[in-house]
Amino acid sequence: MLAIRTRRRKAAALATAAVLAGLAAPSLTATTATATTAAPTTVTSDYDSTYYKDAIGKTGADLKSSLHTIISDQTKLSYSAVWDALKATDEDPADSGNVVLLYSGVSRSKSLNGGDTGDWNREHVWAKSHGDFGTATGPGTDLHHLRPSDVRVNSDRGNKDFDNGGSAVDNGGGSLTDSDSFEPRDAVKGDVARMIFYMAVRYEGGDGFADLEVNGQVDNGSNPYIGKLSVLKAWSDEDPPDAFEEHRNQVIYDDYQHNRNPFVDHPEWVESIW
Ligand SMILES: [Ca+2]
Ligand SMILES: [Ca+2]
Ligand SMILES: [Ca+2]
């Protein structure tokens, strides 16, 4: 998988270099006689001709609708099964006995899952009160937005929306918070944004759950919305997917839910839809 990822990166880098140099992509000059300008920079994933084939070429609402259909075909976990799944998806690459905690960045023993101070627990990045989906099998057990978090830091985040600003969270790894919002540390800002965007596409009012959507506010309370859209888009740009985020997407796809977060594979789709 690492080799595949590397190839993809190299291909993307070459395509970008070609565009920067003002060169048309070779495939365009070879197959399209009327091409007179360089192709826009495109992102490719290993799943474009298979998993994403019905979405490729679409934009905006059509893209969102197509992705919803694709990613809704999934296996669903019970809330108790989430514990062991997170031990796999968020394993510390440097220590297989540990998981990496989302907001603090701390590496902590997998065996310290629980509810006491010093434990890690199951953080719902899309706060479960925003749409009131709880921990029933469904959005409340969807691994694509569940992450190990320090119990106290999880409590400090609570059900706040996301925005820039505030004061430092205790042992929060650089995360900030104020009365109405939470700002995760820089290294996971994009991860958080892409988890939120996944949830907005995956949950469209079916399955007996609310239609989750992103909006421009920070005081959403129990409404099925999370903000702040402009900030989440900026975070996605500033913190593109890295090996850890891509690996957890792959583990969820291969071993658990068998669906993918499209925004980890195609971060540019955020801008197309929102
Ligand atoms: Ca605020
Ligand atoms: Ca990141
Ligand atoms: Ca939705």
Image (cartoon, grey):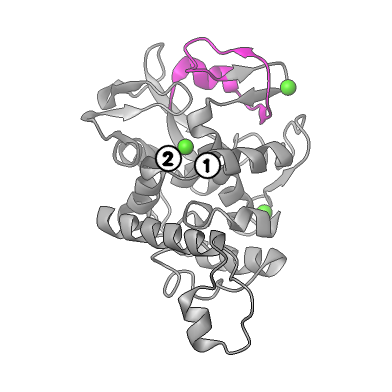
Choose between 14 and 22: the one closer to the eye. 22
Determine the residue located farthest toward the left in the rendered image.
Answer: 96
Q: Residue at x 73, y 40 (%)?
A: 230
* SS type, badge 2: helix
Q: Could one spot residue 271 in this view of the protein?
A: yes
Q: Quadrant of residue 36?
A: bottom right
Q: Mark 1 highlights which residue? A: 140
The answer to whether residue 167 is magenta is: yes
Badge 1, how many Cα within 10 Å: few under 14, some, many 20+? many
Amino acid type of the residue that numbered disc 2 sits on in the rendered structure: Tyr
Within 8 Å of ligand 3, the CB of disc 2? no
Name which of mark 2 and mark 1 comes first in the sequence.
Answer: 2
Q: Where is residue 11 in the image (x, y as percent from the top left)?
A: 40, 63
Q: Magenta region: which residues?
A: 149-175
Q: Mark 2 highlights which residue? A: 79
Left or right of 174 on screen, residue 204: right
Q: In this view, does 243 lie above or below 272?
A: above
